[in-house]
């Protein structure tokens, strides 16, 4: 993926995080439990933090070696799996969907985020 693709992904993540945050704060608070709302807000926070991280890394790509693309891809997938599975878990009754394995996707997303950050640690260019 190109730098512009990751910038677009980060903008999409930031945009939808703001939308989902507003949805949770103004609409869902009366439709779901406080525990579910807290989970939903966790998904929004992680999505927004990683949107900013992906944007920051993409805009400073010259500080990293070529393997940074792999790290960015793991951060992208991890955010997608982690946050969006939380949204679906919280909203599954409202959306009337049944996906029994949905709860397994969240920890996989968390693991992908950890791997993405771990790989990023080794992507810094060495000083000459």
Image: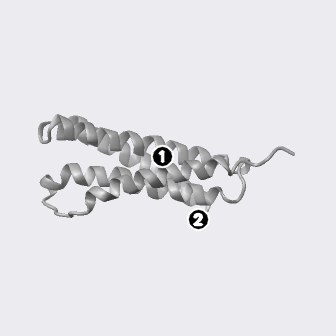
Seen from the viewer's position, the closer of residues 85 and 60 is 85
Q: Residue at x 56, y 55 (%)?
A: 72
Q: Is residue 39 above or below residue 82?
A: above
Picture coordinates of residue 79, whole percent (x, y): 43, 52
Residue 69 picture quarter: bottom right
Q: Which mark is residue 112?
A: none
Q: Residue at x 19, y 51 (%)?
A: 91
The answer to whether mark 1 and mark 2 are in CB contact below 8 A is no
Q: Is residue 14 left or right of residue 4?
A: left
Picture coordinates of residue 75, whole percent (x, y): 50, 53
Seen from the viewer's position, the closer of residues 7 and 29 is 29
Residue denoted by label 2: 1
Q: CA distance from mark 1 to mark 2?
A: 16 Å
Seen from the viewer's position, the closer of residues 104 and 53 is 104
Q: Quadrant of the N terminus?
A: bottom right
Picture coordinates of residue 82, whole percent (x, y): 37, 52
Secondary structure under badge 2? Answer: loop
Q: Which of the two labelled residues, at mark 1 and mark 2, occupies the earlier sequence position?
A: 2
Q: Residue at x 15, y 57 (%)?
A: 95
Residue denoted by label 1: 51
Seen from the viewer's position, the closer of residues 43 and 21 is 43
Q: How is the protein colored in the picture? A: one colour
Q: Residues within 10 Å of mark 1 (few under 14, many from 20)?
A: many
Q: Residues within 10 Å of mark 2 (few under 14, many from 20)?
A: few
């Amino acid at each position: 993926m190109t730098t512009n693709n990751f910038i677009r992904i980060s903008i999409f993540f930031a945009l939808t995080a703001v939308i989902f945050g507003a949805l949770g704060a103004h609409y869902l608070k009366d439709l779901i439990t406080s525990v579910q709302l807290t989970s939903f807000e966790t998904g929004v926070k992680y999505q927004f933090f990683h949107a900013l991280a992906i944007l920051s890394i993409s805009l400073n790509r010259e500080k990293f070696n070529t393997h940074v693309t792999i790290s960015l891809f793991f951060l992208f997938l991890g955010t997608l799996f982690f946050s969006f599975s939380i949204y679906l878990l919280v909203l599954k009754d409202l959306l009337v969907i049944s996906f029994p394995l949905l709860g397994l996707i969240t920890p996989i997303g968390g693991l992908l985020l950890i791997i993405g950050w771990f790989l990023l640690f080794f992507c810094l260019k060495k000083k000459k």
